[in-house]
Each structure stands twice: as structure tokens, then as C-alpha cells.
Image: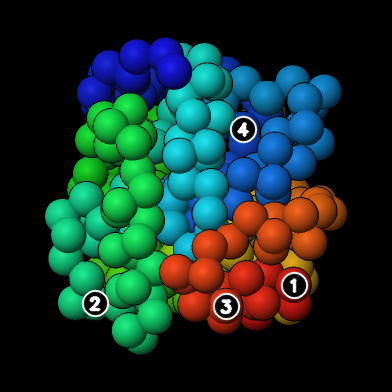
């Protein structure tokens, strides 16, 4: 696995970047991740935004980290912790909504290699990151500004605290969305409106929008369009990799995207 320079692996400013791949909530599902990467291989991706939860639930946390680590790190614009990285690396399992979630997280912690833990420790641990793409001010947050790790931005939410950003990228809910909000502004040239675009790519490895396919998004920085994407992968193959030490709920839910 290539060495990731802690924090410095991110690019604070990306000028004239066109195709940007947005991934979140891979959750140790290497089969789904590989299919996503295969599907975008010919799309001229110039940058990647990773919104957290690379690990846990699925059986391939180490494999997912290695695959991400094998990507040229100069392509990775954002790489933030999600609530699962935060809980597992700090060994704080109090916030999971069920005991089976805490059991899964403890199991994942035991499976992580030293190389995986080193990589996780070089991600942005705060779960939030400000950056710029094509001169536009952006925010990446695993959850929301209300709670960085444990509360999602709900589709349609447009709190004033997001007003300063052109783009807000978030994950955690495992439910994709793209919407825009126009705030009141003193910018006469824009008819006193300020636009913020909210993007959640959905989950690569544990979707919860009743679509079991691996989900992600692509932002075209040239024309401003956002595509919400979904690709089929071999779910049964992934299910067979699960350990009985993890509640069967997590292997069953990926079959239905719930």
C-alpha cells in the first residue's frame, strides 16, 4: 500500500477539475467497491471525494482500505472519517443504535491490520473538511454540521449554516440526494440569490433506499451536473464472505438495499 502523508495527502485547491467521483459508506464491501471502480475506469475521473465509513459491517474492511490506498493519492481530494472510523479507532461504541452494531464494530476492530490502522490514522479524523474545486468553496462532512458523525443532512434541509458553500457533500444516511437551495444574498448580479448544491452519493456497500446496487455520484465540474449512479455487483458472492461473528442482519440487508 502506498504511503499516505497524513493530512498532506489532500489537495487544498483543485483548479479546473472536471470529473469528480464521490463515494461514501463503502462499509467493508470490496465486491461493490471493485464494481464501482471498474464502472468508472473509462470516465476520465480526475479527483475522488471519500465521505467516510470505509469500514465495518462488511467483511472486507482491510481489502477496501488497501484498494483505496492503491489509488494515486494525488487524486484524492477529500478522505474523511465517518462515524464507524471514529467509533472503532477510538474504541467508543456507545453511540450505536443497537448492540449488534457495537458487536460488529468490535469485531471489525479485531480484524484490522496494522497497515489498515495506519491508513485510517492518516485520514481527516474530524469527519469534516473545507476545500475548493474550480474556485468554488466546498464542504465535505460525513454527517452534518449539527452532528458531524451521527446525524445526516436530510434531503431538502437548507439551514443557514451551509449558506457560505457552493457545494455540500455528505454521507451517513446511505440514501442519495442532489438538490439546490437559493439563499438571500447581496449579490445583485445573481438577483440577490446565493446557490448551494447539496450532494449525498448514497452508499457503495450498504444502500438503504431499497436499491441493492452499489451507489455513488459523479460531479462534472465543467458543466455543474451531478449524476447519481448505481451499478450491479455480485451480492451473493459478498454475502458468502461474512463471518458468523457478525449479525446476519447485515448480510441480509444488502440483498434488498434496506
Q: Nearer the viewer, mark 2 or mark 3?
A: 3
Mark 1 or mark 4, earlier in chain: 4
Q: Earlier in the sequence, mark 4 or mark 3?
A: 4
Q: Residues within 10 Å of mark 3 (few under 14, many from 20)?
A: few
**Residues at marks 4 and 3, CA–CA distance in whole angstroms:** 35 Å
Locate residue 75 relative to residue 79 in the image: left or right: right
Q: Are marks 2 and 3 in contact (CB under 8 Å)?
A: no
Q: Residue at x 81, y 53 (%)?
A: 234
Few, some or many C-alpha atoms within 10 Å of disc 2 (few <14, some 14-19, many ≥20)? few
Q: Position of residue 74 (x, y in %)?
A: 46, 15
Of 193 and 166, nearer the camera is: 166
Q: Residue at x 52, y 20 (%)?
A: 70
Q: Which mark is residue 248?
A: 3
How many numbered callouts? Answer: 4
Distance (Cα) linking label 1 and label 4:
28 Å
Q: Which residue is mark 2?
A: 95
Observer able to see residue 10: yes
The crowd level at tag 4 (other Cα within 10 Å; few <14, some 14-19, many 20+) is many
Question: Which image quadrant for residue 47?
Answer: top right
Q: Position of residue 142 (x, y in %)?
A: 38, 56
Residue 177 seen anywhere in this rendered image of the structure = no
Residues at badges 2 and 4 in contact (C-beta under 8 Å)?
no
Which structural element holds mark 1? helix
Residue at the (44%, 18%) spot, across then down: 1
Of marks 1 and 4, the one in the foreground: 1
Q: Secondary structure at mark 2?
A: loop
Return the disc, 1 or 3, that comes first in the chain's sequence. 3
Q: Earlier in the sequence, mark 2 or mark 3?
A: 2
Q: Which residue is mark 1?
A: 255
- Find the distance from the CA under tag 2 to the CA under tag 3: 21 Å
Q: What's the distance in space between the residues labelled 2 and 1, CA to CA?
A: 26 Å
Amino acid at each position: 500500500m502506498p504511503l499516505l502523508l497524513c493530512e498532506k495527502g489532500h489537495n487544498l485547491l483543485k483548479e479546473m477539475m472536471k470529473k469528480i467521483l464521490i463515494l461514501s459508506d463503502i462499509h467493508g464491501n470490496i465486491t461493490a467497491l471493485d464494481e464501482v471502480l471498474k464502472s468508472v475506469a473509462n470516465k476520465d475521473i480526475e479527483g475522488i471525494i471519500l465521505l467516510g465509513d470505509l469500514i465495518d459491517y462488511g467483511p472486507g474492511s482491510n481489502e477496501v482500505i488497501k484498494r483505496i490506498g492503491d489509488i494515486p493519492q494525488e487524486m484524492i481530494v477529500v478522505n474523511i472519517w465517518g462515524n464507524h472510523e471514529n467509533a472503532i479507532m477510538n474504541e467508543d461504541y456507545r453511540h450505536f443504535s443497537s448492540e449488534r452494531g457495537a458487536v460488529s464494530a468490535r469485531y471489525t476492530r479485531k480484524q484490522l491490520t496494522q497497515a489498515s490502522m495506519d491508513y485510517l490514522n492518516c485520514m481527516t479524523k474530524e469527519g469534516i473538511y473545507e476545500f475548493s474545486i474550480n474556485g468554488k468553496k466546498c464542504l465535505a462532512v460525513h454527517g452534518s454540521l449539527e452532528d458531524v458523525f451521527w446525524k445526516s443532512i436530510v434531503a431538502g434541509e437548507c439551514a443557514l449554516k451551509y449558506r457560505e458553500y457552493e457545494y455540500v457533500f455528505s454521507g451517513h444516511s446511505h440514501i442519495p440526494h442532489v438538490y439546490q437551495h437559493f439563499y438571500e444574498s447581496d449579490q445583485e448580479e445573481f438577483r440577490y440569490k446565493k446557490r448551494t448544491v447539496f450532494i449525498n452519493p448514497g452508499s457503495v456497500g450498504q444502500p438503504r433506499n431499497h436499491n441493492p446496487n452499489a451507489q455513488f455520484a459523479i460531479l462534472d465540474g465543467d458543466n455543474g451536473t451531478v449524476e447519481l449512479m448505481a451499478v450491479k455487483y455480485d451480492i451473493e458472492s459478498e454475502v458468502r464472505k461474512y463471518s458468523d461473528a457478525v449479525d446476519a442482519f447485515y448480510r441480509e440487508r444488502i440483498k434488498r438495499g434496506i
